[in-house]
Image (spheres, rainbow, N blue to C red):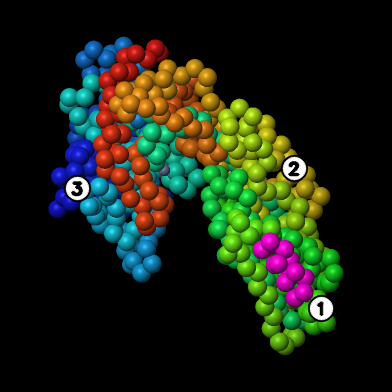
Amino acid sequence: MSILENLQPQNVLRIFEALCAIPHGSHNCKAISDYCVDFARSKGLAVRQDGAHNVVIYKEATAGYEQAPTVILQGHLDMVCDLAPGCTRDMAKEGLVLRTDGAYVWADGTSLGGDDAVAVAMALAVLDSDDLPHPALEAVFTTDEEAGMEGATALDPAWVTGRHMLNLDSEDEGVFTVSCAGGIRATCHVPVDYETAQGIFCGVILKGLVGGHSGVEIHKGRANANRLMGRILSALTAEMPVHLAAVVGGQADNAIAAECVATMVLRQEDLPRAAQIVTALGESFRREYQTADPGLTVEWRQETAAEAHEAVTTAEAARRVADALLLLPGGLQSMSQDVPGLVQTSLNLGVAQMAAGELTATFAVRSSLTSEKRWLCRQLERLMALLGGSVTYVGDYPAWEYEKDSPLRELVCDVYRRQYGKEPKIEAIHAGLECGIFAGKLPGLSCVSLGPNLLEIHTHRERMDVASLERTWNLVCEVLRRCKELTV
Ligand SMILES: [Zn+2]
């Protein structure tokens, strides 16, 4: 039963609905990838699929467009799976249940994955059409974008010959993204040693922080729970022997840590002073962050009886952990001098965890300047060396730097102006996009990122604006029709 069949653009939404019937959370992309391969084959189009389940589909230029440069239509196959409280849907195995009121499309009880199935649907609809004029096309569908852009990283650049790319993974109609930060995930390792300690088991619970995305919200002055815990542990270890049992803070390297819990064993006689230190710092934090994090709370808990606790850190190791969390840099580092309001460089201590003989502190480091990214990594490395630790890296991706002259950007903007009667917004962002990976892999690439309005992506409240999709679809078709104007 097709629920979207009376909405426009009809073919885009027909394909979108088919994609939504296939479960496609990150790391579960084989089925949707195979669907795209079958789609290409059924249309007689050349197609390639790699071991990461990335798909590239090739379509020849329509008559009269043989001389126009090849255009890449790009989006990602995976989605973020989020369930509403109480929803029992198994998103690994079951497709989505679509709903619409004519103005919006959403999924019942789950995220919609309009980010980024709508890109795949638009690209497939172009490939499917017999009447849209267009240049030679390469549709590039990547996997596991939401899990660290793994598909784009794995893709063989030789499979992509075009140098003009429309990335369809934006969610703000009329805002065209033309530059993004590069980044790397850095994990600092501080060794700890354990012993058995006699004393009272206590805990500090920092919670109620706003958190947020470490790329787009790092400049908002919000507290990072892991770094605040560093201040508390540092104050405690300065005055008394502390034996840490656990430190657990944050959810992901790219999310500002909204919660951190530390448990420890203290001597009975130190408890009143410890409670005092934690309470006083809690009050300071609430004052410092009363605007950015009005819900911040710091709780102190203690058990009553003293006993022997195994596998807690030595007091010396606890001081090392405290030093690391206190001294590791974090947050906004510099603003762009060229693009007003753009964060140039930042890092976020997203996850802090003490387990298996070490404290690990995992950062998302971002910069639109590779040299500043390297500088921050160097700081982490030297600080770890001083604490007897080390740094490991994964997921290094280059910045997508702003192109001063871009005929593709000019064309997209001109089509927009004629269609909408106003200026589009041109944006550079302080977050990673697949465009950055492609800019690194495909020398000379020109790229613009755009898409229809998608609200509250990555949550079960996600919804797609249907009228916005229709306008965006018209824009994409018109750009393809006019791309003869692009010089190679
Ligand atoms: Zn996306």
Q: Is residue 398 left or right of residue 63?
A: right
Q: Nearer the viewer, mark 1 or mark 2?
A: 1
Residue type (three-letter) at the residue carrying disc 3:
Leu
Residue type (three-letter) at the residue carrying disc 2:
Gln
Identified at 49% across, 20% down, the residue is: 444
User: Is ligand 1 within 8 Å of the beta carbon of the residue shown at mark 3?
Assistant: no
Task: Say above or below: 199 vs 65.
Answer: below
Identified at 31% across, 34% down, the residue is: 472
Please provide percent x and percent y for residue 327.
76, 52
Instruction: Give me the disc on residue 4.
Output: 3
| Measured Cα–Cα span from mark 2 to mark 3 | 53 Å
| Of the image marks 1 and 2, the number of the one nearer the N terminus | 1
Please provide percent x and percent y for residue 122.
28, 36
Residue at disc 1, secondary structure: helix
318, 33: nearer the viewer: 318
User: Is ligand 1 within 8 Å of the beta carbon of the residue shown at mark 2?
Assistant: no
Please provide percent x and percent y for residue 394.
59, 44
Instruction: Give me the disc on residue 379.
Output: 2
Which region shows up in magenta? Answer: 275-287
Identified at 75% across, 86% down, the residue is: 306
| Of the image marks 2 and 3, the number of the one nearer the N terminus | 3
Quadrant for ligand 1 reads top left
Q: Say which residue label 1 marks.
A: 270
Q: Is residue 466 left or right of residue 294?
A: left
| Measured Cα–Cα span from mark 1 to mark 2 | 35 Å
Identified at 36% across, 52% down, the residue is: 462
Task: Say above or below: 394 vs 440.
Answer: below
Q: Is residue 206 left or right of residue 410?
A: right
**Magenta residues: mostly which secondary structure?**
helix
Q: Any magenta on residue 479? A: no
Which class describes the residues within 10 Å of circle 2: few (<14), some (14-19), or many (20+)?
Answer: few
Which class describes the residues within 10 Å of circle 3: few (<14), some (14-19), or many (20+)?
Answer: many
